[in-house]
Image (cartoon, rainbow, N blue to C red):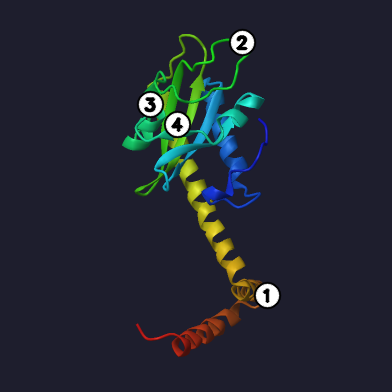
Amino acid sequence: MRDLDPIDPAFGFRDGAAAGPMLRLLIWTGLQLSGGEEGSLLLYDPATEDLRFAMTIGPAETEQVLRGQRVPLGAGITGLAAATREVQIGAPVYRDIHQAERKDGPETPEALIAAPVVSGETLLGVITAVSFAPGKRFTGEMGRLYGGFAAVAALLIAQERELAAIARERAAHPSIARIAAALERVAEQRPEVLVEAERMIDALARISLPAE
């Protein structure tokens, strides 16, 4: 399993975030269990209302070729999984994805699992497993397994985006970051002081902010 470029920060991920390698490990594990040769994470882009390849596990050149390519909602097995919020299994029918050249075997996938990555009511993306082996078919059991993997992926992505939002807020307001760091030190060394600190912050808020 390679460690290639991190997920594009445009998707709300921090540089060097642990969520990236963990998602790669999740996809790699799915491939080992399903017998697929390639697996991908596609993230939903609300601005364009489609899916974009964000990472792929497989041959070295595959991620460079697939990364950034888009799949419309409802298009093929992957787009259908995103549109219906249900795991889909079958032979790929969406042919507008440019595949990496393969030295041995067919260049067109024979079988595909696509599991939607959903947090609450929010679509985050889709994870996939692909096989190029002639006659290969994924089972319903594999589909249920990928549904579980997608739930784990949703937790990782949602948590990373929340942490990234906090980091951006702290970067925009350095004083908040300094106060938070000071409170963390107090919590470690003098936790009993936190009660008084909370009272002071509440008092400052009452003085500074208009009543609701």
Disc 1: which residue: 189
In this view, the residue in front, 28 or 211, is 211
Q: CA distance from mark 2 to mark 4?
A: 27 Å
User: Measuring 39% from the left and 43% from the top, which residue is drawn there?
Assistant: 49
Disc 2: which residue: 104
| Residue 7 placement: quadrant | top right
Q: Amino acid at mark 4?
A: Tyr
Q: Is residue 157 visible?
A: yes
Disc 4: which residue: 146
Q: CA distance from mark 4 to mark 1?
A: 44 Å
User: Measuring 46% from the left and 44% from the top, which residue is drawn there?
Assistant: 154
Q: Tell which circle, 2 or 3, labels the residue nearer the N-terminal end.
A: 3
Q: Secondary structure at mark 1?
A: helix
Disc 3: which residue: 76
Q: CA distance from mark 1 to mark 3?
A: 56 Å
In percent of width and height, residue 182 lies at 65, 75
Q: Is 25 displayed left or right of 136 in the figure?
A: right
Q: Secondary structure at mark 4?
A: helix
Please state which of the two labelled residues, at mark 4 or mark 1, is closer to the viewer: 4
Q: Residue furthest bottom?
A: 207
In this view, the residue in front, 115 or 144, is 115
Q: CA distance from mark 2 to mark 3?
A: 25 Å
Q: Secondary structure at mark 3?
A: helix
Q: Amino acid at mark 3?
A: Gly
Q: CA distance from mark 1 to mark 2?
A: 62 Å
Q: Tell which circle, 2 or 4, labels the residue nearer the N-terminal end.
A: 2
Q: Secondary structure at mark 2?
A: loop
Q: Amino acid at mark 1?
A: Gln
Q: Tell which circle, 4 or 3, labels the residue nearer the N-terminal end.
A: 3
Please state which of the two labelled residues, at mark 2 or mark 4, is closer to the viewer: 2
